[in-house]
């Protein structure tokens, strides 16, 4: 659906006073928001992206006086080059963009097609960090006549450093508005039956296409520092429930399905067990065949394609493993779009008949 649809000025009962704002059509906006992406893999776009991401107080909760000297003195001088090389290994060269942007765009477009029977709905998409920004696409929805907006952080499990910061950015932008649309935000859907079933079907389909049967299947979630968990973040519990329901849906024997956490950063202790240490230990213990999936990621990205499909695979094979496979995220598959559509239709009840 076109986020720049023409305005409806026919709702006014008479001539508008000179200088009166345009009268908007009564539309309902749906804004899909994912984490973010750099615009390129070279130093400057990587530094710009990392600066925005790592300056977020929801992501790094250290006092600014302690964190900023490290961020500006070390991280932003060394990490852009390293991260740029990692992004280059998974970059969508055909579109000159990261896979995350490619998949998020496709999800927005396909959701628009699925909701084409609801002409009052306008679908758009944005990134929390990088482009297109939440502010830019929110303004486009308002310009299109949306007086109600559903903000959809694309994270099945809630974490303050993901879901909350998307909502922060949206409402921070609303502080600049004289007139605010009515707003709803999508809650965590880590235990939604459609989501669990979609994951299970994607696993079953992928494993059926392998020439081996994995001895272990690992669900690897992005980690958070233990200190965030101790402060009350429900993320760990959401991940564990997703894994428990998924294991039940698959009907596997105990021990075949495992839960781990990846992507730790800095000196703090993070949620455990760690994915990289787990695949290494499994290989050294004699496990020869494994597969890994990322249930917490709606779309494949650096953390799934480079950190898991490449790095974790290399660790496993280097330490004695023989067969490794990465199970893709739901992305814009039919199963993945079923989940997004189900959540959107549920959360729009009362706004859309």
Image (cartoon, rainbow, N blue to C red):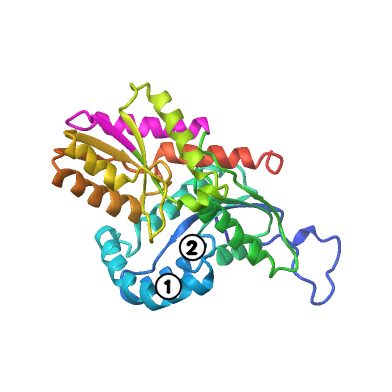
Q: Secondary structure at mark 2?
A: loop
Taking 39 as reference, is 155 left or right? right
In 3D space, how far apart are the residues under numbered discs 2 and 1 (Cα atoms)?
A: 10 Å
Reply yes or no: does residue 275 show up in magenta. Answer: no
Does the image show residue 197? Answer: no
Residue 259 rendering spot, x and y as whole percentages: 37, 37
Which residue is the site of mark 2? Answer: 60
Taking 3 as reference, is 291 left or right? left
Closer to the chain start, of discs 2 and 1, is: 2
Circle number at residue 20: none
- CB contact under 8 Å: marks 2 and 1: yes
Residue 180 rendering spot, x and y as whole percentages: 72, 61
Seen in the picture, residue 230 relative to 15 is either above or below; the reply is above
Which of the image's four quarters has the C terminus? top right
Q: Look at the image and give the residue range highlighted in magenta.
A: 192-218
Residue nearest the viewer, comparing 62 with 95:
62
> In the image, what residue occupies the spot 34% across and 69% down?
40
> In the image, what residue occupies the spot 38% across and 44% down?
272
Circle number at residue 71: 1
> In the image, what residue occupies the spot 31% across and 31% down?
205
Reply yes or no: does residue 211 show up in magenta. Answer: yes
Q: Secondary structure at mark 1?
A: helix
Residue nearest the viewer, comparing 332 with 58:
58
């Amino acid at each position: 659906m076109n986020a720049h649809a023409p305005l409806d000025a026919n709702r006014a009962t008479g001539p508008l006073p000179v200088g009166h704002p345009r009268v908007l059509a009564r539309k309902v906006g749906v804004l899909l928001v994912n984490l973010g992406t750099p615009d390129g893999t070279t130093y400057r776009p990587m530094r710009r992206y990392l600066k925005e991401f790592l300056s977020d107080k929801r992501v790094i909760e250290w006092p600014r006086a302690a964190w900023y000297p490290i961020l500006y003195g070390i991280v932003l001088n060394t990490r852009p080059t390293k991260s740029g090389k990692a992004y280059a290994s998974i970059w969508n060269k055909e579109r000159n963009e990261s896979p995350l942007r490619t998949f998020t765009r496709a999800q927005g477009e396909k959701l628009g097609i699925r909701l084409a029977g609801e002409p009052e709905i306008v679908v758009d998409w944005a990134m929390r960090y990088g482009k297109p920004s939440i502010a830019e696409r929110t303004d486009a929805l308002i310009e299109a006549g949306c007086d109600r907006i559903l903000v959809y952080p694309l994270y099945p499990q809630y974490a303050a450093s993901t879901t909350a910061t998307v909502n922060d950015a949206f409402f921070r932008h609303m502080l600049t508005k004289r007139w605010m649309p009515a707003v709803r935000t999508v809650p965590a859907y880590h235990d939604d039956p459609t989501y669990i079933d979609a994951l299970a079907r994607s696993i079953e389909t992928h494993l059926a296409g392998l020439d081996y049967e994995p001895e272990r299947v690992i669900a690897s979630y992005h980690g958070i520092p233990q200190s965030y968990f101790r402060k009350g973040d429900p993320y760990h519990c959401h991940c564990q429930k997703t894994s428990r329901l998924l294991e039940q849906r698959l009907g596997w024997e105990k021990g075949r399905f495992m839960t781990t956490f990846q992507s730790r950063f800095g000196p703090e202790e993070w949620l455990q067990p760690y994915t990289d240490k787990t695949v290494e230990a499994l290989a050294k213990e004699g496990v020869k065949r494994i597969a890994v999936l990322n249930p917490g990621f709606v779309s494949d990205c650096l953390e799934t394609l480079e950190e898991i499909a490449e790095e974790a695979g290399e660790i496993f094979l280097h330490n004695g493993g023989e067969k490794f496979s990465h199970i893709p995220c739901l992305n814009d598959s039919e199963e993945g779009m079923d989940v997004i559509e189900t959540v959107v239709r549920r959360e729009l009840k009362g706004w859309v008949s």
